[in-house]
Amino acid sequence: MTLSAVGAVGFLSGAFVIKHWEQVPITTSVVQEAEKIIGQQFTPPQADSMLNMLNNFSSSYESLHKLNMPNSVVPALNFNPVPVGFVNPDKQDGFKMSKTTGTKLPADKNELAFYTIRQLADLVKSKQITSVELTRFFIDRLKQYNPQLFFAVTITEERALQKAAEADVEIKAGHYRGVLHGIPFGVKDLLAQKDYKTTFGSVAYQNQQLNVNATVVNKLEAAGGILIAKTTLGELAMGDVWFGGKTRNPWDVKRGSSGSSAGSASAVSAGCLPYAIGSETLGSIVSPSTECGDTGLRPSFGRVSKYGAMALSWSMDKLGPITRSVEDAAIVFNTIQGTDGKDLSTIAASFNYDGTVKSLKGYKIGYVKNDFERRSQNHATDSATLAKLKELGAELVPIEYPKMPIGAMTFVLDAEAGAAFQELVLSHRDDQLVQQNKNAWPNIFRASQFISAAEYIQANRARTLLIQEWYEKLKGLDLYITPSFSLNLSMTNLTGNPCVVLPNGFNASGRPMSITFMGQLFGESKLLQAAKIYQDATDFHKKHPSLNFKS
């Protein structure tokens, strides 16, 4: 295929003109070559009749490229995951945490590293420890283990200690804001905080500083949280390799922490952050939480504002907490969820969580029968999870996936990512990215320029059918469970359903394995309640890595 033919395929599929190419007229022979890419065939007269329009398209694309739109510009289109006939699972808002007995400051303060948010909050509220002391403790751990685990892009020490001191003054004066007041946290470095760089984990953006605060950061700080780290992500939200190296798994430092919420998962697992914010488009909370033995919540699409976050896929990106326990995830989610006038993709929905529920009696929990029958390395632990849920009182109901080409729809992500980072392709800065193999972002971004706009829309129409069919299949269920890595992961990132991934055992090498609890759309309350009941009946989440590597 000639260079002009390649360019023409780009024109036909809503793509680009490489800047150093001379724009050439599209001819019938170019159209015939392009047909091989788009999978269609036209007669010579039909091709000839298109030429004026195709050449006009070409000029339009070139004009649009001159706008140099940054990643922060959102398309004038919003994905809606709500199926026809949908009824919100929660009728009202409410948040009730489980009761705790008086937490005491441990004799060995190193034990604080693996305390939950609830335990740390008890200590801060009762003034057994100050926010400054706690913040210093976690900053010191970040500094101690970052050289081996590579989980932090930026440690926000000076600002964090100032904010912690302010929190101590408020708490001492009796102005306690709630359970997150004075508690340190981290955010994946695709979330903006205006005083620090927001690098996207990428060579191409490693000096970028955005003059905004992400809504999630603002909400957590308004609740009294202390931002102490911008955590690593695999470059532009893929994998665990970023411009500073490879983020490591605290359970086995020879392994990566998986991605792309690599640093958030690694730092929480290593006891260097009480909790952190991650993001998921196609597994980026589920995968690193599994690898590192954390509890991760991927909320329903539209539940949490993405304002101030890097866009990879406007219709699939979701922000959520990575924590030590399900109730910690519920606490953080309760703070960050809600609509935002700066993010028109947010959707109003109630959240009515009750952490005092002790039994699964009355719960109808689906399970994807074929997934649990498959003889995978997780078969024994996943089967034990089913047995435990039944023991706790749940009624288990077998379900099946819709018979639809789910994998064929996932190029929606590629198309949107190719638009979000088209400027890297046009400027050839994609050559700067760390990963350059065939399955890495540079090649995906380039190939995505050839995705037909019509086929992108068709995939989203198929997605509408998938959303409706899955909604119908889940009617009557409170939630369902599935192995963490199955067709369900792709499907529900397309449908927008929420999930909680949590440890349910360990493999022969001593590394964590996980199970995924899945919710109805906007069904985070029942999802979190059930996951907490299961987690309270097990102790997998209470184990932590030995960190016996040199520090």
Image (cartoon, grey):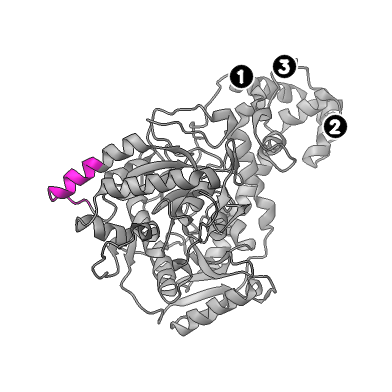
The residue at the point 58 percent across, 43 percent down is: 234
Region rendered in magenta: 165-177
Left or right of 197 in this view: 30: right
Pointer 1 and pointer 3: residues touching (CB < 8 Å)? no
Q: Are marks 2 and 1 in contact (CB under 8 Å)?
A: no
Q: Report x, y in % for residue 522.
A: 42, 59
Image coords of residue 238 (percent x, y): 61, 44
Q: Is residue 171 magenta?
A: yes
Mark drawn on residue 20: 3
Give the alpha-carbon distance from disc 1 to disc 3, as whole Å.
Answer: 15 Å
Q: Against 542, is 73 above or below?
A: above
Residue 361 x, y percent position in the rendering: 40, 82
Quarter containing the N terminus: top right
Q: Which mark is residue 33?
A: 2
Is residue 88 inside the magenta stretch?
no
Image side of residue 141 versus residue 369, left or right? left
- As rendered, which of 420 and 43 lies closer to the eye? 420
Residue 528 is left or right of residue 266, and the answer is left
Disc nearest the viewer among 1 and 3: 3
Dot 1: what SS? helix
Circle 2: element type? helix
**Label drawn at residue 63:** 1
* Residue for point 26% across, 65% down: 103
Q: Residue at x 57, y 52 (%)?
A: 257
In this view, the mark in front (3 or 2): 3
What element does badge 3 sit on?
loop
Residue 92, given in percent of the width and then of the height, sits at 29, 62
In the displayed structure, 331 sits above or below 513; it is: above
In this rendering, would 408 be left or right of 251?
Answer: right
